Image (spheres, rainbow, N blue to C red):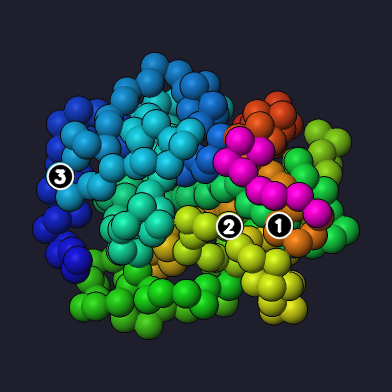
Amino acid sequence: MLYKYQDYQESCEVIRDIIGDFQPETALILGSGLGFLADEVEAPVYVPYNYVPHFKGSTAPGHKGRFVFGKFCGKNVVFMQGRLHCYEGYEMEEVAFPIRVMKLLGAEKLVLTNAAGCVNREWNPGDIMLISDHIRLFGFSPLTGPNIPEFGTRFNDQSEVYDAGYRRIAAEEAEKLGITLREGVYMFFPGPSYETPAEVRAARVLGADAVGMSTIPEAIFASHAGMKILGFSLLSNMAAGVQNKKLSEEEVLEAAQASSEHFSALVRACIPKM
């Protein structure tokens, strides 16, 4: 599917009818098991994805599938409480569609979170990884097709997708909170099957520290649109083959729950400084 600029405008107008003149400055996308952060929004206004034209539904476990608008840490924000994935049968452009809508609503900053498998043998499940860069070898870019110049240039620079200034803020705040914050490279796999041990070994050779099934389509769209990005991966489990155990959805959600206190503390500390 190739969207037109008018499609994004129509989605924006429907949301604007619900939220009025509220203008978010920061957008946050919450990954598997991380939707609890949106429960802290003050005076929330909820907009289910299925209310919005051109949107697709979120079907992944632990994803509520709605926007939450309101105040968070003193800032006007919009949370995506659940995201879309290519493994749900969506194209990358469909997965990333909400990014441009949030940009039209006023968001210039983006916080991306996900639950990921840990590839780096020196790290542990439950650690938080600050995303410094990413690897995408699978599928077309969400920017494939005619460029929409209202959002960005045909060939956009990707040398610093994840803002260096935001990464410094995250590192400083983690140190103040006594949180061990890793920093590394996230590699995209399409899913829904977890990666094989051989794929995990290949990811490690290529320089990846974590693997997952999301985040990259959104990061590419946001970078194209000139948004500044801060990305976190909750390392919910060691990736396949690192340990002699099978992987499961339950493990991912349980790890997110166990890490919720320090993960939410770090995000709350970063938002006012961005």
Q: Which residue is disc 1 drawn over?
A: 239
Image quarter of residue 6 = bottom left
- The amino acid on which the numbered mark 2 sits, given as a three-letter code, is Tyr
Secondary structure under the numbered disc 3 in the rendered image: loop
Q: Circle 1: is it few (<14), some (14-19), or many (20+) Cα within 10 Å?
A: many
Q: As rendered, which of 19 and 218 lies closer to the eye?
A: 218
Task: Report x, y in % for residue 15.
Answer: 21, 36
Depicted 51 relative to depicted 215: above or below: above
Q: Which residue is disc 3 drawn over?
A: 53
Task: Report x, y in % for residue 2.
Answer: 19, 68
Whether residues under marks 1 and 2 lie with C-beta atoms below 8 angstroms apart, the answer is: yes
Front disc: 2 or 3: 2
Q: Which residue is disc 2 drawn over?
A: 194
Asked if residue 78 shows in the view, the reply is no
Task: Report x, y in % for residue 168.
Answer: 72, 54
The tag earlier along the polypeptide, 2 or 3, is 3
- The amino acid on which the numbered mark 3 sits, given as a three-letter code, is Pro
Secondary structure under the numbered disc 2 in the rendered image: loop
* Residue lying at 42% horizontally and 63% vertically, measured from the top left: 217
Q: CA distance from mark 1 to mark 2?
A: 8 Å
* Residue lying at 86% horizontally and 36% vertically, measured from the top left: 178
The tag earlier along the polypeptide, 1 or 2, is 2
- The amino acid on which the numbered mark 1 sits, given as a three-letter code, is Ala
